[in-house]
Image (cartoon, rainbow, N blue to C red):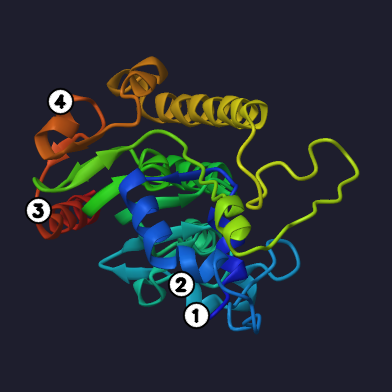
Amino acid sequence: MTGMPHLAARWVGTPIAMHPAKADIMARAFGGRVLGQPVRQVSGSEPLAGLLIEPMEQTEPDYVRPFITNSVAVIGIEGVLCAKGKWVGRNSGETSYEGIMAQAVMAHQDPMVKGVVLEVDSPGGEVSNMFACARVIRELARAKPMIAILSDMACSAAYALATAASHIIIPDTGAAGSIGVIALHASYAGMLEKQGVEITILKAGARKADMNPYESLPADVRDTYLAELELLRGKFAGMVGLHRGDRLTMEAAMATEAATYAGEAAVAAGLADAVADPHEALAAFIEEINRA
């Protein structure tokens, strides 16, 4: 695979709500192929779907239907989270907010669903569509009992979605938090100069070429984008405070400075409500839902 323009567009030069260690792994694993090699062919294999033109819950009802067991719908929030596309399972390594929202709508409308579990195991992902997805999940949580069960981690964007549930259950080795936003900028100016390649950027509009990879990042551009990231972090923390209330206020979420917390430490910090084995937590929730 010599060119990955769809990946480059998603995580280079754009805000990402992702655990920084995972972002670093992505940069190391895909950086050369995403930005450092010529694009020979643009793959058309990514199954995109329009939010308005082709809503997934209408065009692919069986494909996106949540797993339902004993009147409880289980919605998976796993892998890297992306704005849209027909990614709804772990097989692709990513889940789309579009797919999560489609499943939430189905669970909301299904009279046989008495309760909902979010199974979360994700380092986070794109900011785009994250807030909209959290709002849809929150509406479902207002209509039907919902808990989030971490099967490992709920970091950054994944934690934002998990907070929409009334309770968050974390395993003793699980991780939660990273309430912040990160952006990556790659400069190939030095490499291109050594290779004798000179890039001329022609632009109409002083800010049109901001964050381009062919020159070092100017201080004013850096400061502008840092300010935008800080605004997004504030919005993120505000949503966490709205969902968690006194358990984790906006101010407390900001004070974490995007740190992650494991197991009991996450509960003590207000990021989670209990430590339990995921299987046992699901069984207890199913029993409670069907007893009511």
- Residue 216 in the image: state x and y as whole percent: 61, 42
Kind of residue at disc 1: Asp
Residue neighbourhood size for the residue with mark 1, other residues' Cα within 10 Å, grouped as few (<14), some (14–19), many (≥20): few
User: In front of the other: label 3 or label 2?
Assistant: 3
Mark 3 and mark 4 residues within 8 Å of each other at the beta carbon:
no
Mark 4 and mark 2 residues within 8 Å of each other at the beta carbon:
no
Q: How far apart are labels 3 and 4 at the CA level?
A: 18 Å
> Relative to 29, does residue 17 appear above or below in the rendering?
above
Mark 4 and mark 1 residues within 8 Å of each other at the beta carbon:
no
Residue neighbourhood size for the residue with mark 3, other residues' Cα within 10 Å, grouped as few (<14), some (14–19), many (≥20): some
Kind of residue at disc 3: Asp
Counting residues from the N terminus, which is met first, the one under dot 3 or under dot 4? Answer: 4
What residue sits 20% from the left and 34% below the top? Answer: 273
Q: How far apart are labels 3 and 2 at the CA level?
A: 25 Å
- Report which residue position mark 1 lands on: 62
- Report which residue position mark 4 lands on: 268
- Report which residue position mark 3 lands on: 277
User: In front of the other: label 3 or label 1?
Assistant: 3
Kind of residue at disc 2: Arg
Counting residues from the N terminus, which is met first, the one under dot 3 or under dot 1? Answer: 1
Closer to the camera, 127 or 242?
A: 127
Q: How far apart are labels 3 and 1 at the CA level?
A: 30 Å
For residue 84, which quarter of the picture? bottom right
Mark 1 and mark 2 residues within 8 Å of each other at the beta carbon:
yes
- Residue 224 in the image: state x and y as whole percent: 65, 27
What residue sits 24% from the left and 26% below the top? Answer: 270
Q: Which mark is residue 65?
A: 2
Kind of residue at disc 4: Ala
Q: Is residue 146 visible?
A: no
